[in-house]
Amino acid sequence: MKRLFFVFALLLAGCSSAPEGIEPVRPFELERYLGTWHEVARLDHSFERGLTNVTAEYSMREDGGIHVVNRGIRQETGEVSEAIGRAYPVGQPDVAHLKVSFFGPFFGAYVVFELDPEYQYAFVSGPNRDYLWLLARTPKVSEAVMTRFRSRAVELGFDLQPLIVNP
């Protein structure tokens, strides 16, 4: 898993800008965003291929950044894979635009472009339209949220052909 997240880090190296036309949520309350999020859907990528039950846990770091722990279960072996990283706000802290690193000084964009008012689900982009996630506080979301996610993603120019929806 570390090798896969290394590849992810290299792909995103230096790409902490939001994709053109994708606006981060504002106002954003980082404290409310902390905690555990379940990956409900994602675009397919090698660094997560074969993983299921993926979660991301966010907590505060002493330096004011965010401690990130991503975990998933390998479908083939049942083993838990884990990657530990760090994130920091890009610009103002009340804007849902972070830079995330799982490897050294290499950071990639993490842009929350839609967020439930109660912080129960989030639509997240990486540095370009090849990276897309639907995260939620629970492993499943309503059909209405899934429909909204798909609609919003297509509206913003994401190709949903390789979309993986967790069972």
Image (cartoon, rainbow, N blue to C red):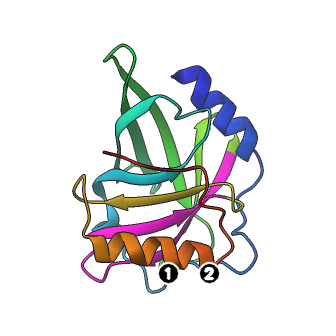
The part of the chain drawn in magenta is 107-126
Q: Residue at x 58, y 33 (%)?
A: 47
Which of the 4 image quadrants contains residue 119?
bottom left
Residue 151, relative to residue 52: is it above or below?
below
- Quadrant holding the C terminus: top left
Q: Number of marks in the image?
A: 2
Which of the 4 image quadrants contains residue 20?
bottom right
Q: Give the Cα distance between marks 2 and 1.
A: 16 Å
Label 1: state its secondary structure: loop
Picture disc at residue 78: none
Q: Residue type at mark 2?
A: Glu
Residue 124, relative to residue 130: is it above or below?
below
Which of the pair 49/13 is nearer the observer? 49
Q: Residue at x 66, y 62 (%)?
A: 159
Secondary structure, magenta segment, majority class: strand
Which of the 4 image quadrants contains residue 11?
top right
Horizontal and vertical percent for residue 143? 29, 71
Name the residue beneath numbered marker 1: 25
Q: Residue furthest top?
A: 77
Q: Residue at x 33, y 74 (%)?
A: 145
Picture disc at residue 155: 2
Q: Residue at x 70, y 41 (%)?
A: 106
Viewer-side label of 2, 1: 2
Q: Residue type at mark 1?
A: Val
